[in-house]
Structures are given as C-alpha cells and as structure tokens.
Image (spheres, helix red, strand yellow):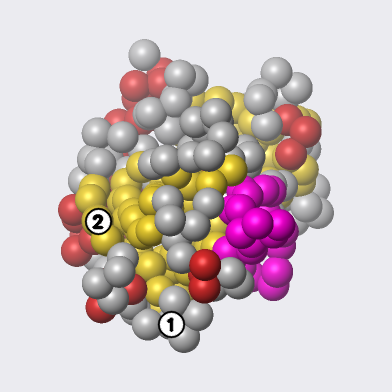
Amino acid sequence: MADKCDLCLLGLIILSSLLTGTSGVDHVFISSGENVSLSCNKALSGCKSTTWIYYNRFRRRGRVELITGGIKNKDTERHERLSLESDCSLNIKNVTEQDSGLYRCRQYVNGEQQGPDADVHLRVLHVSVSPSSSSSSSSSSSSSSQTEISPGRSVTLSCQLYSYDIFSCDDRVRRGVELLWVNQAGVDLKTDSRYQILSSSAPDQDRCIIISLTTTLLNEDDNREWRCQLTHRDHLETSVRYTVKYSGEKTLFSDRFVKTSTDWLYSF
C-alpha cells in the first residue's frame, strides 16, 4: 500500500512540475557506460540523515531503497557501483539501461522528514547491434558481446532511450526529445538512401524512444563512424558513436566500448 501511495505522489509531483514549469524535478540524460552524479540538494550537514530511493514501474522491484541513513543497502543489485559524495549526491558508476528511473533523495531528523524531496529522472541512451546475417554462430544483439560479421552482410544498430515516466513517449517527443543517426560530419543519415532509419516509441515499455539504423556493410566502411545523438529542445544532451574497425580479411568484430571524451567508441 505504501508503494502505491509513493507512486501516486510521484505522479502528482511530475504533473505539477509540467503544468507550472517549476524545476522541482531534475532531468539527466546520459549514455550507458558513463558515470553520473545525482544531486540531493541537501539542507542538512552530513549525510547520516540522507535516504535515496529508486523507482521504476517496469522493474521487478519497482521501489528500492538504495541508501538509508547515509549507508548503502548491500542487498541491491547495483551496490558496488554506488557511492555518496560529501554533499550527499548519489554517484552511479558504469551506468546501464537498467539504471534508468526516478531517484528521490530524502532527509530525516529523528524520524521526521526535513525539507522537500529532491527528485532526479535518469534517462539512459543505449545502443545494441543486431547482425541479420553472421559468419559465426553467435546470435547475440548486445553491444557488450562479441559478434563476427563481414562486408556484404546487413547490420542493424538500435539506439534506445530508457526512461521512467507516467506520461506517454509521444508526449515526451512533443516536449522536444529526439534521437538521430548522423555521420562523422553530423549529417542526418535519413538523407542517405543507403541507410534505412526507423523510429518508434514504446509507451508500454521502459524503452521510451527507439531509432534503428540498418545498412549493408561495404569494404570502404573501415573506420567509418555512425553516431546516435540525443537532443532535448535542440540541445545536444549525449551521444553514442560506432566506428567500424576491420581486421584481417575485412571481418567485422563487435567488442567492448572504449571511452573517448563525452562519447563512446564501439570497435567492431
């Protein structure tokens, strides 16, 4: 019953912030694999009074108390990736799409809440690769698994924004969130007939917006870069890039990402 009350209150908070234009809810966009710090806006000294709660209606455990009284709860799946800053901000290392959701910071003294909640919506941009035909037996579509393909075969890159909202994804698009596949020069690949670009929203899932790129690999694709970028009201928030790397007899390999400045380089 308490969980349902929290979710109802959450809906009212978000609705109020949208209608009034207040900044009571912070919105953070980030690419998977990066580190992020979520602000608590604390009013009290020290963090022993601080509690961080995570919400996501699409997860098996839709409400999880990550930090209680300034101490990490060890039974949470992300325990090893969490830490508190001196200002009680919540740090999350190596963010995954599973981390998307709403994070709420509360502070208590003698069991009574002090000040308003600090709410942060964390939205995670993630890309996976799905070769439609492979020279190996692997059928994995994860960006962190290994898949062997070759020029002349088709490959699909799926760029997905993971988000927790009580509002539809269509509404989020109307409020200025957009995903684009672009080339190294920043040109929208929709203008190139070689690429098939498909956009969709999934309001019944946590993958709020999806844009896929499908193309047939060419020999000259060696060192070619494709980038999925997320913009919010025409401002670039974050991006993920794929750079094709051939080796040997022009065989394409998918490997782990390597961080480069604000982007992620996926070597194939």
Q: Which residue is mark 2?
A: 198
Which x, y percent locates residue 138? Answer: 55, 31
Q: Is residue 150 above or below residue 59?
A: below
Q: How many labels, in total?
A: 2
Is residue 259 within the magenta segment? yes
Q: Which amino acid does the dot numbered 2 rest on?
A: Leu
Which x, y percent locates residue 129? Answer: 48, 47
The reply, left or right, for residue 87 in relation to residue 199 is right
User: Do residues under tags 2 and 1 come within 8 Å of each other at their CB atoms?
Assistant: no
Q: Single out the residue that lies furthest toward the top.
A: 1
Q: Which residue occupies 38% across, 68% down?
A: 181
Q: Which residue occupies 27% across, 61% down?
A: 197
Residue 72 in view here: yes
Which x, y percent locates residue 248? Answer: 71, 57
Q: Is residue 148 above or below residue 140?
A: below
Q: Which residue is mark 1?
A: 186
Q: Is residue 187 above or below residue 25?
A: below
In front of the other: 236 or 191: 191
In front of the other: 127 or 6: 127
**SS label for mark 2:** strand
